[in-house]
């Protein structure tokens, strides 16, 4: 469980099966009880739903792109993918466990923009928005995944505005850097 509201704090960080054991019921009944407890507003993180073998195979497929749908929440257990999804794939590329670094970066930028028809995104060229991530290769190599840390990332620019400087979020800049956009042409 990632978050179940004020009445469910003791279950945060548990798997549904662990909560079921504590509640003395089946995982399905525990899940329903936890939904009721949170008034159906709880969050669950899907941990360990992939293996090294799956990641290894998929990372070498030309049509597979890198993304995350994770975000930071105000309360509860955070999804580690909000912090280290991209650093993990960059680390794999540096260690030779994925594709090359240029291809890994392409799968995080231009290839995503191309697939979702996001005009003026994903590339560093005149006329494109300046969305840039700055990373330190040594820090990527030394980083430990799944520790709620965007290891190796030292700077981020969104639409040319610096929103992460020396690994510290620039709250005011971040608040106004993004832009709503429509996918497709």
Image (cartoon, rainbow, N blue to C red):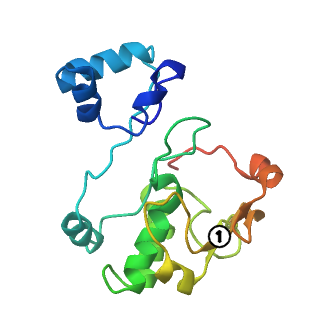
Residue 16 x/y as whole percent:
28, 32
Q: How many marks on residues?
A: 1
Which residue is pictured at 43% across the width and 34% down the height? 12
Neighbours of disc 1 within 10 Å: few (<14), some (14-19), many (20+):
some
- Where, quadrant-wise, is the N terminus in this rendering? top left
Disc 1 is placed on an element classified as: strand
64 or 7: nearer the viewer: 7
In this rendering, the answer to whether 66 lies above or below 71 is below
137 or 101: nearer the viewer: 137
129 or 163: nearer the viewer: 163
Which residue is pictured at 54% across the width and 86% down the height? 138
In this rendering, the answer to whether 129 lies above or below 36 is below
Which residue is pictured at 36% across the width and 18% down the height? 35
Residue 143 x/y as whole percent:
49, 75
In this rendering, the answer to whether 38 lies above or below 63 is above
Residue 153 is left or right of residue 100, and the answer is right
Residue 185 is left or right of residue 155, and the answer is left
As drawn, the residue found furthest toward the right would be 172
Residue 69 x/y as whole percent:
46, 47
Q: Which residue is mark 1?
A: 132
């Amino acid at each position: 469980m990632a978050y179940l509201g004020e009445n469910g704090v003791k279950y945060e960080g548990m798997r549904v099966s662990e909560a079921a054991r504590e509640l003395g019921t089946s995982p399905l009944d525990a899940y329903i009880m936890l939904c009721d407890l949170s008034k159906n507003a709880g969050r669950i993180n899907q941990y360990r739903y992939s293996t090294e073998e799956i990641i290894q195979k998929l990372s070498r497929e030309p049509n597979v792109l890198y993304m995350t749908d994770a975000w930071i929440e105000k309360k509860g257990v955070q999804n580690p993918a909000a912090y280290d999804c991209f650093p993990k794939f960059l680390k794999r590329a540096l260690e030779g466990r994925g594709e090359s670094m240029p291809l890994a970066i392409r799968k995080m930028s231009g290839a995503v923009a191309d697939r979702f028809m996001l005009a003026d995104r994903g590339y560093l060229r005149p006329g494109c928005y300046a969305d840039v991530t700055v990373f330190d290769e040594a820090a990527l190599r030394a980083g430990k995944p799944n520790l709620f840390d965007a290891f190796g990332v030292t700077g981020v620019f969104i639409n040319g505005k610096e929103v992460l400087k020396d690994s510290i979020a620039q709250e005011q800049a971040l608040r106004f850097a993004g832009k709503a956009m429509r996918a497709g042409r």
